[in-house]
Amino acid sequence: MKIYLAVLKDEVNLEEFKKYLKEKKIKFLDYYKTLGIVKLQSEKKISEKDVEEFCESIEEEKDNLTI
Amino acid sequence: MKTEKYIVLLENQEKKSLKKIENELQVSITSSEFLSKENRSFDVIDNDNGVLYKNLGVVVVENMDEDQLKKAVKDDSNPIIYFEKERDFFPADEMKIISELKKQSAEISNKINELELYLNNKPIPPKNFVEMEWGLKAIGIEKALYTGKGIDVCILDTGLEMSHPDFASREVEGKSFIEGEDWNKDLNGHGTHCAGVSAGNLRGDTGKRYGIAKDCNLKIAKVLSNSGKGTTSSVVDAIDWAISKKFRILSLSLAAPVGLNEKPSVLFETIGSRALENNCLIIAAAGNDSNRPSIPKPVSAPANSQSIMAVGAIDGQMRVAKFSNGGLNPSTGGNINVCAPGVDVFSSYPKNGKNKNFYIPLSGTSMATPHVSGLAALFMEQFPDKKAKEIWEMIETHAKPIDGLKYRDIGSGLIQII
C-alpha cells in the first residue's frame, strides 16, 4: 500500500471525487482544507492522468527527508 | 509726565502753509534761526510751541494727537507729508556689548553643562554585556531590541528534549507526527539544537547567549523520527496543524536531495503559497549534499520551492560552508534566498550517555535555518502589521552581501537585525 499526496483543483466537488476514488478502489485518508491537499492510499500506482479531473498534481509519499 | 516729540516733514514752508499748521496743531512755530545758546530747542518746544528747521523742512512739536497727524498726511491739501515719533539714540558702549556677549556665553555654558549632566546620568542603553555565540554576533543580535515576544515559532524536527534545563520551565506546545514517539523527548538531539538557536536564551554553563527569540511562543512538531528521518506525509500533517493553529513561522531543518534541473514539487509549492496566504512563513534548509570546492549540489526539497524560503550556511570566516547546497536550479525556484551561520554553531542538546554536556556545536544548513526563523520572529514582533510575505521581503532586503561570495551560494546575503 502506497500513500499519495494530491493538490486539489480549485472548486472541486469533494464528494464527487470521493465517489470516483471509491470506484477506483483508492482509499481517501485525509483532507487538508487549508492547504487544498488530500492524502490517498492505494495498492496500485496512481498516475496524474488517473486524477487529472480533480487534481492539479499527485505524488507518492517520499521517505527521504533527513536532518 | 513723559513728553513725546514728533518730527513733522513739510511739503513746503510757505507762510500760508505754516499758518495752517499752527492753526491745526494749535502751536506757535519758531524758526530755528532764532535758536541760540540761551534759547535752545528743548527750551522752546512744549505743548504750545514748535520749532521749524528751515534747512530740513521739518517742524518739531510736542505731545501731538497722532490721529490728527495721520489725517493731515492723508489730506493732499495739507503741507504735512510725513511724521514720526522722536527716537532715542544711545552711543555704542563696548562694555555693554561685552557684557551682552558674556551673558549669552553663560547661557550656552549652562546648556552645555545640562547636556553633560544628561549624558553622564542617562540610562544605560540596551547594550548587551552578555557574551554571545559567533552566529549571533554575525547577524548583529547585540543591536536587537526585540525578543520575539508573542510570536508563534514552530520547529518541525526531531522534537524537543523538555528535560533540558533551558526549556524545562518553559511553556511549550507540541505534537508528534511520528507514531510511537513523543514530541517532548528528543533522543536524536537535532530538534533540541535547532529550537535552541531559534528560541533559546543563555547557556547555563558559560552564560553565553546562543538563542535569538527567547520570548517567542515555542511550538514543536515532531516530523522526524529519532533516527532523523521523515516522510512528506508527516511534514504535510504538521504544516496543516501549524497553519490551523495560526503559527506565524515554520522552521524546517530538513531536506531531501533533488537532481539537477529537477522541478520542485507542486505539493510543496502549493503548501508554501497557502501558508503565505494564511500569514505564515515557511523557512527551510538548503541541504548539505555539497562538497566544495567542487560544484555544489542543487538546493534540496522542500527549500527549492519558490514559496518557501531557502537558507544556505556560512562559517565564522564568512565563507560558504563546504556542505551548503547552491542555487543551481534558479529558473524553477531552486535558488538560495539568504544565508546564516551554520558551522560550529553551539546550541542546546540533550545530555545522554554519549553527550556529557547540555550544549554542543553542530554544523549544517539545519543550524542556519533557525537563525532565520528566530530573526523572523523579531521582525514580526517589531512590525506587527506586516504580513508574512512582507517579513520575508524585509529579511532579504536587510541581508548583507558578503564580499567575494556568489548570489548562487548566499542569495541576498547574511541575514541582519534591523
Image (tube, coloured by chain):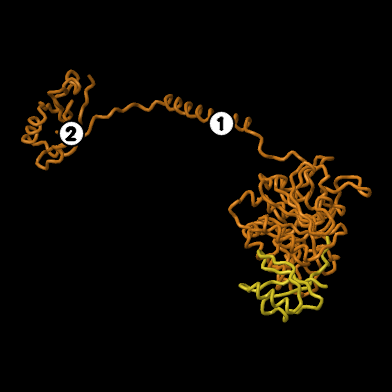
- Can residue B88 be seen from the camera position used here? yes
For label 2, the crowd category at 10 Å Cα-Cα, with few meaning under 14, some 14 to 19 and many 20 or more, is: many
Q: What amino acid is found at the position of numbered circle 1 in the picture?
A: Ile
**Residue located at (67% from left, 79% from top):** A53
Q: Which residue is mark 1?
A: B112
Task: Report in which chain the residue with disc 1 lies.
Answer: B
Q: Which residue is mark 2?
A: B8
Q: Are marks 2 and 1 on the same chain?
A: yes
Q: Colour of chain A?
A: yellow
- Depth check: B343 or B11 in front? B343
Q: Give me the chain that's orange.
A: B
**Residue located at (67% from left, 57% from top):** B395
Residue B132 in the figure: left or right of residue B40: right
Residue B151 in the figure: left or right of residue B35: right
Q: What amino acid is found at the position of numbered circle 2 in the picture?
A: Val
Q: Quadrant of residue B357?
A: top right
Q: Secondary structure at mark 1?
A: helix
